[in-house]
């Protein structure tokens, strides 16, 4: 299944993935997110990978927690003193209204199409009322395996299909080019929990 395929890739390439992504300049994206943030609160990073964004948010005054399915990423982040655990967003539905913010940079795009709404539902359960969530997907209309990883691409229109039945609504969208120059554009989405 898609989930296992993804994690095998990250298991085998964890060191190179950390090296490749930890210093990527995310300032444009942080700015896009932070303009929707009213105060520094508790943020959950889903699929934190190299830990880059956890480190950044902690440095600017957020209380940070992270989850990732790849144990090697979890162990590296623990060495950095970060509050993380080895968990899938698909298994998270008990931290009701615990987080002010959720950050999911290039992580939910590996969740199979049929499970993506459940992932967004779990995010909405975990967000406080009026909470803000950021997520990013490769831009376009594609679903399938590339380089041993399952991907689902989204557009301004298709994101809404996966939010049906959740309390998350699109607040803002920004399309950006790929920071690692792989030729893809990315869709960056800000969601707000509205009841």
Image (cartoon, helix red, strand yellow):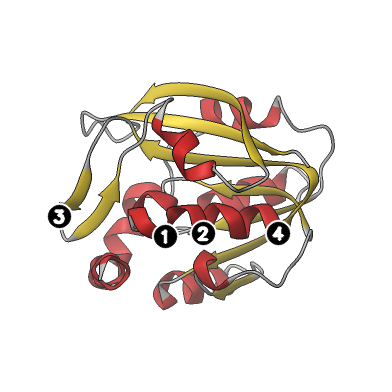
Tag 1 secondary structure: helix
Q: Quadrant of residue 18?
A: bottom left
Query: What residue is shown at x 28% (from left), y 64% (from top)?
Result: 6
In the orientation shown, which residue stands out farthest toward the front? 165
Q: CA distance from mark 4 to mark 3?
A: 32 Å
Residue closer to the observer: 5 or 75: 5
Q: Bin the neighbour count of mark 2 within 10 Å (Cα to Cα): few under 14, some 14-19, many 20 and up.
A: many
Q: Is residue 51 visible?
A: no
Q: Residues within 10 Å of mark 3 (few under 14, many from 20)?
A: few
Measuring from the top left, give residue 78's x and y in whole percent. 57, 74
Q: Position of residue 41 (x, y in %)?
A: 81, 48
- State left or right for residue 160 relative to residue 45: left
User: Which residue is denoted by mark 4 in the rendering?
Assistant: 126
Residue for badge 3: 147
Report if the CB atoms under discs 2 and 1 are less than 8 Å apart. yes
Which of labels 3 and 1 is toward the front?
1
The mark found on residue 115 in the picture is: 1
Question: Please, what secondary structure does the residue beneath circle 3 have?
Answer: loop
Decide: marks 3, 1 in contact (CB < 8 A)?
Answer: no
Residue placed most toward the observer, 147 or 116: 116
Question: Along the polypeptide, which appears first: circle 2 or circle 3?
Answer: 2
Label 4 vs label 3, nearer the camera = 4
Image quarter of the C terminus? top right
> In the rendered structure, which disc, 2 or 4, sits on the residue that comes first in sequence?
2
**Which of the two labelled residues, at mark 4 and mark 3, occupies the earlier sequence position?**
4
Q: Secondary structure at mark 2?
A: helix
| Alpha carbons under labels 3 and 1: distance apart | 21 Å
Q: CA distance from mark 2 to mark 4?
A: 12 Å
Residue at x-position 19% and y-position 51%: 144
Q: What residue is shown with label 2? A: 118
């Amino acid at each position: 299944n898609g989930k296992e395929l993804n994690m095998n890739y990250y298991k085998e390439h964890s060191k190179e993935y950390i090296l490749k992504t930890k210093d990527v300049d995310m300032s444009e994206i942080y700015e896009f997110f932070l303009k929707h943030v009213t105060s520094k609160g508790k943020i959950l990073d889903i699929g934190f990978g190299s830990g880059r964004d956890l480190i950044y948010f902690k440095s600017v005054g957020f209380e940070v927690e992270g989850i990732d399915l790849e144990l090697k990423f979890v162990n590296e982040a623990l060495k950095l003193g970060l509050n993380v655990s080895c968990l899938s967003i698909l298994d998270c539905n008990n931290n009701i209204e615990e987080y002010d913010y959720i950050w999911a940079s290039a992580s939910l795009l590996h969740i199979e199409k049929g499970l993506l709404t459940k992932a967004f539902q779990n995010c909405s359960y975990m967000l406080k009322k009026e909470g803000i969530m950021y997520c990013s997907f490769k831009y376009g209309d594609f679903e399938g395996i590339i380089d041993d990883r399952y991907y689902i691409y989204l557009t301004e229109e298709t994101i809404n299909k996966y939010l049906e039945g959740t309390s998350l609504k699109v607040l803002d969208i920004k399309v950006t080019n790929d920071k690692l120059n792989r030729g893809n554009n990315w869709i960056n989405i800000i969601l707000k929990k509205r009841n």
